Image: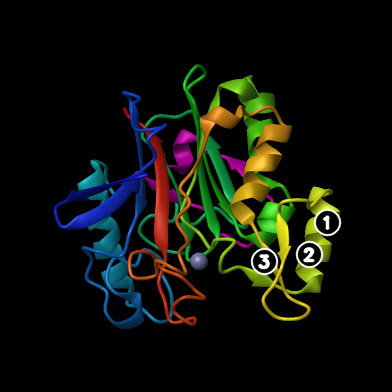
Amino acid sequence: MIRVERDKVTFYQFLGLRSFPGLSHFVSGREGGVSVGGQAALNLGFMDEDRDDRVLTNRMLLAEAVGCSVDNFTFGEQKHTTHVEVVTRAQRGRGGREKATRLPSTDALITRETGVCLMVLAADCVPVLMYDSRMRVIAAVHAGWRGTVGRIAAQTVERMRDEFGCDTRDVIVGIGPSIGPCCFEVGEEVVEAAREGLGNLEGLVETGKQPGKYQLNLWEANRRQLRQVGVEDARIEVAGICTVCHHDHFYSYRGDRGNTGRFGAGIMLNI
Ligand SMILES: [Zn+2]
């Protein structure tokens, strides 16, 4: 990813996605907003620990920096489901200004409408952005460990194929900053769920530093499931940035011991 600073707001872009005219995308960082304390400064998530007016201001600052409006931002109510929603023009802006209008129980969003900025929020979970330049279809995915072992990223690509006729080989993917294999220590129950959902865990799980603990690699788990549905390895870009190790630049639930905010990943077909 490359780092961009604009109007004091810092955001990041995937090399593989930034070259397309007519496509906007970004992953926001922590810098440039008005939130304070553990949520400082560019917290994008409405939450008890932050004031709604500050979150809305942050979203407006980010929108301006990336060249759109908060009314383009479209959010799902992220519930660690594998529900994929195809977003219509009429749903543009849902959840952008307030929590109540978010698309219910939705962790992945797909659209081919222009002016709909698909948004996912994260603070260790894996944000994934997708683009099919041939069919002009985009997607944004929130994949925590539950979503990852539920194969939500693969399911999203399959839905792009089934709904819009995308060839999975054309899909370009950016796997964003999130908890890395260095820091994602899990117990036996998570490993068991991963085995059930993903099958062969070779290369995805390593023995942890403590007895009965394991290190799970969510980046590779997402990359592998995307390859299994036909996405080409060369079209998958992994940011490789661990949010726990870099919690000074990205919100991290584990890195900030729970007192944190949310950064966002967004993608939009320009009008
Ligand atoms: Zn780490």
Tell me the distance, in whole angstroms, between the alpha carbons under discs 3 and 2. Answer: 9 Å
Q: Earlier in the sequence, mark 1 or mark 3?
A: 1
Q: Residues within 10 Å of mark 1 (few under 14, many from 20)?
A: some
Q: Which residue is at the front of the view, 5 or 93? A: 5
Q: Earlier in the sequence, mark 3 or mark 2?
A: 2
Q: Give the answer, above or below, for where 161 lies relative to 106.
A: above
x 72%, y 59%: residue: 205
Tell me the distance, in whole angstroms, between the alpha carbons under discs 2 and 1. Answer: 6 Å
Q: Is residue 45 magenta?
A: no
Say which residue label 3 marks: 215
Q: Which residue is at the front of the view, 190 or 151? A: 190
x 71%, y 31%: residue: 229
Tell me the distance, in whole angstroms, between the alpha carbons under discs 1 and 3. Answer: 14 Å
Left/right of residue 78 with respect to residue 133 in the rendered view: right
Q: Residue furthest left?
A: 7
Q: Is residue 78 magenta?
A: yes
Tell me the magenta residue range: 73-93
Give the numbered dot on residue 78. Answer: none
Say which residue label 2 marks: 191
Say which residue label 1 marks: 195
Q: Position of residue 91 (x, y in %)?
A: 47, 43
Q: Is residue 93 visible?
A: no
* Snapshot quadrant of residue 165: top right
